[in-house]
Amino acid sequence: MNVMRALILVFLGAASVAAASEERPRYALDRPDEIVWRFRLGPLFERHVTREGGTFTAVRPFYSKVEDPVSGERVDDAVWPLATFHREREQRWWRVLNAFGHRETPGAEQDADWMFCFFPFYTQGETRQGDDYWSLFPFHGYLPHIVLMDDIHYTLFPFYFRYSVNNVERRYYFWPFYSETQEPENPDVWHSGVFPFYGKTVKRTGTNSYAFWPFWVSATYTEPQNSGNSWILFPLMAQIQREKLCQWWVLPPFFGYGKSTTSEQWRLPWPFVELKQEREARLRSFWPFYSDLFDGEHRRYTGGWILFSHEVNSVKGVRSDRLRFFPFYTDEEIYAHDPHTGAESLREHYLRVWPFFTYLRTPARSGFRTLELNPIRYSGGIERNWAPFWTVYSRHHDFRKHRIEHDGLWGIINFVVSDDETHEEGDPLP
């Protein structure tokens, strides 16, 4: 994990940190590791061992630890989401409040890289190439590969700030007011401006400039077979006139019409009414009440903005169908396509009725649990440290071993029964 990923995790928040950093569930409904020994004291204390040698210990909500000898993974949580520590083979990363760090030792052919950050004030580390870097914000610093930028240099920010992206160097003095851009490999590409009064950019594909941004912005395009120009007189009008695109706005961006060689678009006004038609795609949006999108192998219907959505995606022989009424209802199905017979088979079915229960079924196993207060499908930190507090009953069915495990009230009720029906792994789901 590099500096960019670490910063993104901080911005997304503690819940998404765990969700993004872990892929193997420990308390999710699909439980591939069979637990061979477990001791629990209500939801407060738990210790269990899996058949593959993995262990889990928790003193909730203060501490939990999970170790997996197969993947080489270890995760320690302390009053999650306040602190978490992760190890997976040669990688280590941790976070305590807004301080985080990582270390990766890829092997003898490369040096180890490490980083420590107390966001946003202090950062220090070393790259795999052996380059040291540090930053003491806002006084002085150098940071490599952060938030989509290759290198950042600053001194007494915002008085001096410089970064590069794809060999294009941008410099700011009294950011964001005075700026310069240069491309060392192509000196004819440059930018200079005193924001917001005036600026001009020269590119290989044309030029653009502004005066008293955003009130006047103009551009000239010199691309072969798609040349033309554009301008914006904000907030009154705007126009794009190119060989393959003609577009205009009144009170931009609210009212507009555009037509290209492959599409036609209306905004009447945006974002409330938007219509777009392409050769193999269509968008109709009447925000916030209803919208639909057809784009090749993708279909999406929404209603009430984010409350209702229905999405169907087909990618490389796998079709997913998801219906959601946030946060109360989620139904997801994944189908696999057989290229020989042309038939589809249901490979996974996930159902959540929040806050009452969740259900998951695959060709190999199924799982059910109640209650379910987590409004997202899986978050490792929540599963390890908080989910047992509201999980009063769970049921796991292993079709391969014809085994059904019932667990209630944190082990007070726990028994296993045999399944009379015969299921073979890989059978389609009913």
Image: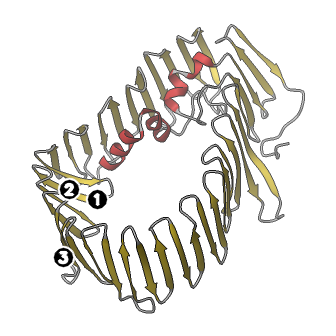
The answer to whether the residues at label 3 and label 1 have Cβ atoms under 8 Å apart is no
Amino acid type at image mark 2: Ile
Q: Is residue 418 left or right of residue 59?
A: right
Task: Say which label, 3 or 1, has the lower sequence index.
Answer: 1
Q: Which mark is residue 184?
A: 3
Q: Can residue 90 be seen? A: no
Amino acid type at image mark 1: Met
Badge 1 element: strand
Residue occupying image coordinates x 67% and y 34%: 328
Q: Which residue is mark 2?
A: 152
Q: Quadrant of the C terminus?
A: top right
Viewer-proximal residue, 271 or 137? 271
> Which quadrant of the structure image shows residue 257?
bottom right
Query: Would you place residue 44 above or below residue 419 in this image?
Result: above
> Which quadrant of the structure image shows residue 376?
top right
For the residue carrying disc 1, how many other residues have a C-alpha within 10 Å: few (<14), some (14-19), or many (20+)? some
Residue 222: % across, % down = 36, 89
Q: Which residue is mark 1?
A: 149
Q: Distance between the Cα atoms at labels 2 and 3? A: 17 Å
Viewer-proximal residue, 337 or 324? 324
Badge 2 element: strand
Total count of labels: 3
